[in-house]
């Protein structure tokens, strides 16, 4: 998808580049860094809830796009919900959205424990919507607040067929320099990332009421580091071990890459006012920030020196959001599941042998904006 809405008859996952995060509770259990990056900007979400227009009747609707298994999504939306119930008696609806292939089972079990809303208020109702965040998923002007956390980095499509020198479009880290991505290929991903922001903004602009709020947050990069550093160096090295022993062909390796992009703050906010993208005037940019969070497994390792636990936590963290793409890139045969397990176990072995080769930092970027009265083009 490149800024154009697919026809109504298109498959709802035709432009998805992943089937979702690793399910069965695995993502919930291994997404503490994502939560810490989310929590760092929730004060802005509370302020947005305090400024939200609440005149009228009917429910006030809040939607989170890219909810995965839901633990972080529920915790994030609980903050604006707690502010809104103090301001209005209108019912509140939370909407949790992700790809139809996402494992919603944990989320569905969590939304109404013991027959009551997880948000602790009798007039708060919740629902789940399956679909791509790059499509309009809710009726025109039905939404009052939209959020997305650590999700829009996943691109709407694969812009090139192969990435022969590395498994990630932003390229290897300077520490490792264990591969290459050409400038031409980097430009293709950068342009798609730009178009994806515009597509997302247009979809949300149709859904949001004038004065509605949008908080856009995602992992990213700054002048000194990128959140892809370390984790993708390690995964790339692990995969190459199986290319070397013949378990993965060179053709499969070159066709496999994680279709994810690390944006700078400028790349996140630039499309908001870019007239060439058709997004200028749809939103007023209220606040934008680039920040770094402490990484929980790094801090534990510094405190206790437990290399085994560190390696397991580190690898499980990135396995939760890389496994689906890796699995689908491998030949569909009886050995695929075993090979996936072996790759992540190899990553643990490599990290334990040389932890200094794979330093990891978590950089994030975020922007809070308000829907204007402008019409969507």
Image: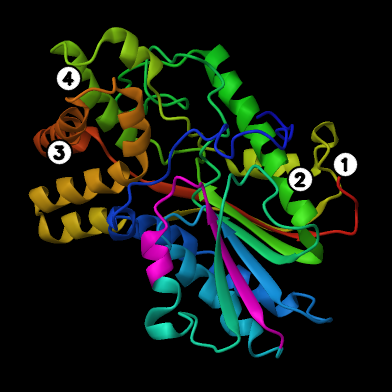
**Horizontal and vertical percent for residue 32?**
34, 60
Question: How crowded is the residue under tag 4: few (<14 C-alpha within 10 Å), some, or many (20+)?
Answer: some
Q: Residue at x 75, y 75 (%)?
A: 52
Mark 1 element type: loop
Q: Are marks 4 and 2 in contact (CB under 8 Å)?
A: no
Residue bearing mark 3: 348
Quadrant of the image containing the C terminus: top right
Structural distance between the alpha carbons of marks 3 and 4: 13 Å
Mark seen at residue 241: 4
Mark 2 element type: helix
Mark 4 element type: helix
Mark seen at residue 202: 2
Structural distance between the alpha carbons of marks 4 and 2: 43 Å
Mark seen at residue 109: none
Sequence-wise first label, 3 or 4: 4
Q: Residue at x 70, y 33 (%)?
A: 6
Residue bearing mark 1: 377
Q: Are marks 1 and 2 in contact (CB under 8 Å)?
A: yes
Q: Which residues are magenta?
A: 90-109
Sequence-wise first label, 4 or 1: 4
Q: Residue at x 37, y 28 (%)?
A: 173
Structural distance between the alpha carbons of marks 2 and 3: 41 Å
């Amino acid at each position: 998808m490149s800024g154009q809405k697919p026809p109504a008859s298109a498959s709802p996952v035709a432009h998805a580049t992943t089937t979702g995060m690793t399910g069965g509770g695995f993502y919930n259990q291994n997404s503490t860094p994502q939560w810490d990056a989310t929590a760092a900007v929730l004060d802005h979400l509370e302020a947005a809830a305090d400024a939200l227009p609440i005149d009228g009747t009917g429910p006030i609707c809040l939607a989170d796009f890219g909810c995965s298994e839901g633990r972080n999504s529920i915790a994030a939306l609980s903050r604006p919900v707690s502010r809104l119930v103090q301001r209005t008696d209108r019912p509140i609806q939370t909407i949790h959205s992700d790809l139809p292939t996402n494992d919603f089972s944990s989320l569905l079990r969590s939304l109404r424990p013991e027959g009551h809303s997880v948000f602790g208020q009798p007039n708060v109702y919740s629902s789940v919507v399956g679909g791509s965040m790059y499509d309009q998923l809710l009726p025109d002007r039905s939404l009052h607040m939209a959020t997305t956390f650590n999700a829009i980095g996943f691109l709407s499509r694969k812009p090139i067929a192969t990435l022969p020198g590395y498994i990630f479009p932003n390229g290897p880290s300077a520490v490792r320099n264990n591969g290459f991505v050409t400038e031409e290929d980097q430009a293709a991903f950068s342009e798609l990332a730009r178009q994806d922001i515009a597509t997302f903004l247009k979809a949300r602009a149709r859904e949001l009421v004038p004065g509605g709020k949008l908080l856009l947050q995602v992992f990213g990069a700054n002048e000194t580091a990128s959140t892809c550093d370390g984790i993708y160096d390690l995964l790339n090295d692990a995969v190459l071990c199986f290319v070397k022993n013949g378990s993965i062909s060179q053709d499969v390796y070159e066709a496999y890459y994680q279709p994810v992009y690390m944006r700078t703050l400028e790349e996140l906010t630039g499309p908001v006012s870019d007239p060439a993208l058709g997004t200028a005037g749809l939103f007023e940019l209220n606040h934008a920030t680039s920040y770094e969070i402490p990484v929980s497994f790094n801090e534990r390792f510094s405190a206790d020196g437990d290399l085994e636990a560190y390696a397991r936590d580190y690898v499980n963290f990135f396995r939760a959001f890389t496994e689906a793409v890796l699995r689908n890139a491998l030949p569909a045969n009886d050995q695929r599941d075993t090979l996936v397990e072996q790759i992540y176990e190899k990553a643990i072995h490599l990290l334990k042998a040389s932890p200094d080769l794979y330093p990891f930092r978590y950089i994030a970027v975020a922007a809070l904006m308000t829907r204007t009265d402008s019409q969507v083009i």
